[in-house]
Image (cartoon, rainbow, N blue to C red):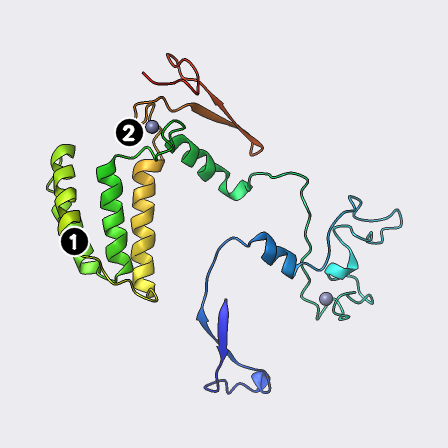
Amino acid sequence: MRGKESSTGGNSKWLHGLPEVRLEKCHLGVMTSEEVMEMSVLSITNTQAFDPLGTPSVDGLYDRRLGTVEVGVNCQTCGQSWAQCMGHMGHIELPCPVYNPLYFKDTLRLLQTICRRCTMLNIPNEQSDFFIAQMQLIYSGKLREMDELIQESKQYNDMEQFGVFIKEYKSKSSQNDLLEELTTSIIDVRADTVKKFYDDFFRKTLKRCCHCQSYIPVYRSERTLQILSSVRKGQKSLYHNRR
Ligand SMILES: [Zn+2]
Ligand SMILES: [Zn+2]
């Protein structure tokens, strides 16, 4: 998140003297390990949260370096009371890689869509070309051209004809200059386009790869801890799975 100081507005008395910040941009995403470590004031290594007297344990989840909610006790990181201290982040180092529970379903869906033999996404070339063409127009800010492309594509119900159409489009289309920065409306269109593509292709599980005809294994999960794969009926093994 980025902001910049502004000298406009802000007549309220209670705001007097406080720096005013105007939000310019907001970016939501997953923090990297480096960012987590940068924010962290403490590595949590003690499984006991409180000692027998009810005092927060050192290196535990309620360590006073993370902030305090106790009246009369100050935070050991910023020195402020419970009323002023906003709290501080800690981190837990995991002994082995684990799946991020927030992305577990998506990881499973992606696996179901990738062929282990040819390593391609199990999406027909025509459809992936169509998606790439849309994204190129979005990143160039050509939303009207993108609408026209979508409308034109609707004429083709037959996949073969659609393939010819998108191939011709690709050969005719010139290299577009990409925008340096995307506007809010372009970001919205991009989100809708990605969601549609995702809904159309990543939510269905195909038994065979559309590129090499190999079987796609059956994947199942055990809670969010592990992903197991097994051969399909008629498939000899995961590694020798051609027809
Ligand atoms: Zn504090
Ligand atoms: Zn394949």
Q: Is residue 191 left or right of residue 76?
A: left
Task: Please tell me which of labels 1 and 2 falls first in the chain.
Answer: 1
Q: Which residue is mark 2?
A: 211
Picture coordinates of residue 208, whole percent (x, y): 32, 23
Ligand 2 neighbours mark 2 (CB distance < 8 Å)? yes
Give the residue type at disc 1: Ser
Please state, as top left, top right, bottom left or bottom right, where the C terminus lies in the image. top left
Is 8 located above or below residue 236 in the figure?
below
Regarding ligand 2, which quadrant of the image does it lie in? top left
Q: Residue 173, which numbered label? A: 1
Picture coordinates of residue 142, whole percent (x, y): 21, 61
In the image, farthest residue toward the right = 53
Q: Is residue 107 left or right of residue 133?
A: right
Give the residue type at disc 2: His
- The residue nearer to you, when weighing 99 against 235, is 235
Secondary element under disc 2, as helix, strand or loop, is loop
The residue at the point 74 percent across, 69 percent down is: 78
Q: Which picture quadrant has residue 178?
A: bottom left
Is 228 located above or below residue 146 in the figure?
above
The residue at the point 88 percent across, 46 percent down is: 52
Q: Is residue 50 left or right of residue 172?
A: right
Q: Which picture quadrant has residue 166?
A: top left
